[in-house]
Image: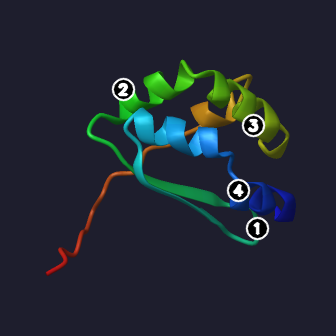
Amino acid sequence: MAEYAERHRAVWPEMRQALTDTGWRNYSLFLREDGLLIGYVEADDLEAAQAAMAETEVNARWQAEMAEFFTGLEGRGPDEGFQLLTEVFHLEGK
């Protein structure tokens, strides 16, 4: 987990740019001590943003680098293991 967190403190500039270019906004990852990983991302169309990202060369390289940190994906890549959650509450800002 320490290595995973360290790698995310140094996300490649071209990876950051590809995420932005493909419509990802306010993307955050949270890692709990037991390995639970929660991600939050905003996009106008998440499926389209994911598909566009999957087409980038930098994403292929990044996913290959991150694959060692993920288990139980039955042959899917780390970026294909998303489980979407339903929002049940939201407090609006002022």
Q: Mark 2 and mark 1 in contact? Answer it, CB < 8 Å.
A: no
* Residue type, numbered disc 2: Ala
Residue 68: horizontal and vertical position, in percent?
85, 40
Tell me the crowding category of disc 4: few under 14, some 14 to 19, or many 20 or more residues within 10 angstroms, Cα based: few
Mark 1, secondary structure of its residue: loop
| Residue for point 33% across, 43% down | 43
- Residue bearing mark 3: 72
Tell me the crowding category of disc 1: few under 14, some 14 to 19, or many 20 or more residues within 10 angstroms, Cα based: few
| Residue for point 80% across, 37% down | 65
Mark 2, secondary structure of its residue: helix
Residue 80 seen from this side: yes
| Residue for point 33% across, 52% down | 86
Cα distance in 3D space between marks 2 and 3:
25 Å
Numbered circle sitting on residue 8: 4
Mark 4, secondary structure of its residue: helix
- Residue bearing mark 2: 48
Can you tell which of label 1 and label 4 is closer to the viewer? 4
Cα distance in 3D space between marks 4 and 3:
21 Å
Can you tell which of label 4 and label 3 is closer to the viewer? 4
Tell me the crowding category of disc 2: few under 14, some 14 to 19, or many 20 or more residues within 10 angstroms, Cα based: some
Extreme residue toward the left, this view = 94
Q: Earlier in the sequence, mark 4 or mark 3?
A: 4
Can you tell which of label 2 and label 3 is closer to the viewer? 2
Numbered circle sitting on residue 34: 1
Residue 54: horizontal and vertical position, in percent?
55, 23
Tell me the crowding category of disc 3: few under 14, some 14 to 19, or many 20 or more residues within 10 angstroms, Cα based: few
Q: Mark 2 and mark 4 in contact? Answer it, CB < 8 Å.
A: no
Extreme residue toward the bottom, this view = 94
| Residue for point 40% across, 31% down | 49
Q: Earlier in the sequence, mark 2 or mark 3?
A: 2
Can you tell which of label 2 and label 1 is closer to the viewer? 2
